[in-house]
Amino acid sequence: MTLPQTLPETQLSPYLVEYTQLQAVDRQMAERQQVQQQHAVQQQAQLAEKEAAAAWQAADQAQLTAEQQLRASTSYQTYLQAVAALMVQHLPLPQFKQRLRGITMPPALGQLVNSYQLGVMATEFARTGQITATRLQIVPRYLVVDLNRFSRQLAAQRQRDWDDDVFNAALGFELTADQRRQRLTQLRDCWEGRQLSDACYATLLRLRESWQQSPVIPVTWPEKLRQAFQVRLAEQPATGWVPAKKNHVTPSQLRQLITPQADFATVVAKYHRLYALPTATEAVTLSALHRYYLVKADQRAGRSKATAKLVTELLKETVDD
């Protein structure tokens, strides 16, 4: 018996259709499983990314909080002011590092900067008058910014103080020749003074005497010194002479204004002759000066306890007369 060469499609057709449908179902299930697996992988990847991002954000926030706490701390501010005070002296590097060891560094700051890095900053400040520390990539930028600000502000204040002092020493009417020479010699010894030539100091020593015949600022002076004198001369009264006024004052300088024989009006007049502080600062300064004056007067008169008792009574909200 000879078998047929072809399959009986008519009889097999229902089975072929079912087989084809089963294949389609299998493919759909396989595709669905693949999509589900890919979705699960994506979800896991997204979750891992979110967790990593959250961890980084938490770390960044913790670092930012630690940075803010450090920068706001008194120890940090005090340390940077002390380092800036060394920066503006333009000391030789070995001497700068030696003096640096005498300044207490906050423990948290010790993990961020060392004496070598601060020495690099000091060298840069001496050369350019500012601190960028571009060579020191591992030093926190906020530390560089803060130290640069402190140093530049202090340098500007020192320069203004020096300009005031050299103006007062050169033109001070009340100074003798020896006193003038002594003060100018002291001013020359500091860094700001060492920037001037011998010729400048020679003219500064003779300026007061030559000023009476010809009140002219020497053209040979450096431009910054000429400008400093021009600004202070513009503030002089039409007649007489007053010292260049300082824009800050220390407690020891205030104490020098008070003498047992002087009344407070005289003390205030001396203060206004020498100092010109911002309005709010001046109000506090004069109030403290007045209180100091009264306390010292009470001490000399032996009435401190009686005065304190009466003040206590006056400060009570209700007074029993």
Image: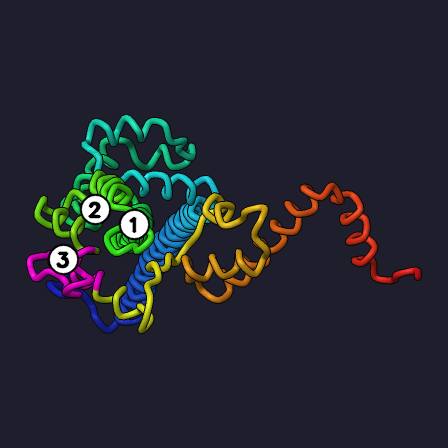
> Disc 2, disc 1: CB below 8 Å?
yes
What residue span does the magenta drawing correspond to? 209-229
Mark 3 nearby-residue class (10 Å; few <14, some 14–19, many ≥20): few
Query: Which color scheme is applied?
Result: rainbow
* Mark before the other along the chain sequence, 1 or 3: 3
User: Label 2, label 1: how many angstroms apart (C-alpha)?
Assistant: 8 Å
Q: Is residue 152 visible?
A: no
Relative to 7, 291 lies left or right: right
Instruction: Tell me, yes or no, whether the highlighted magenta stretch contains residue 49.
Output: no
Mark 1: amino acid: Arg
Mark 3: amino acid: Met
User: Label 1, label 3: how many angstroms apart (C-alpha)?
Assistant: 123 Å
Quadrant where the N terminus lies? bottom left
Q: Residue at x 38, y 37 (%)?
A: 109
Q: In terms of image quadrants, where is residue 230?
A: bottom left
User: 74 or 8, which lies in front?
Assistant: 74
Rendered location of residue 54, percent (x, y): 42, 52
Judge depth for marks 3 and 2 and give the one in front. Answer: 2
Q: Is residue 279 above or below residue 168?
A: below
Residue for badge 2: 192
Residue for badge 1: 158
Residue for badge 3: 1
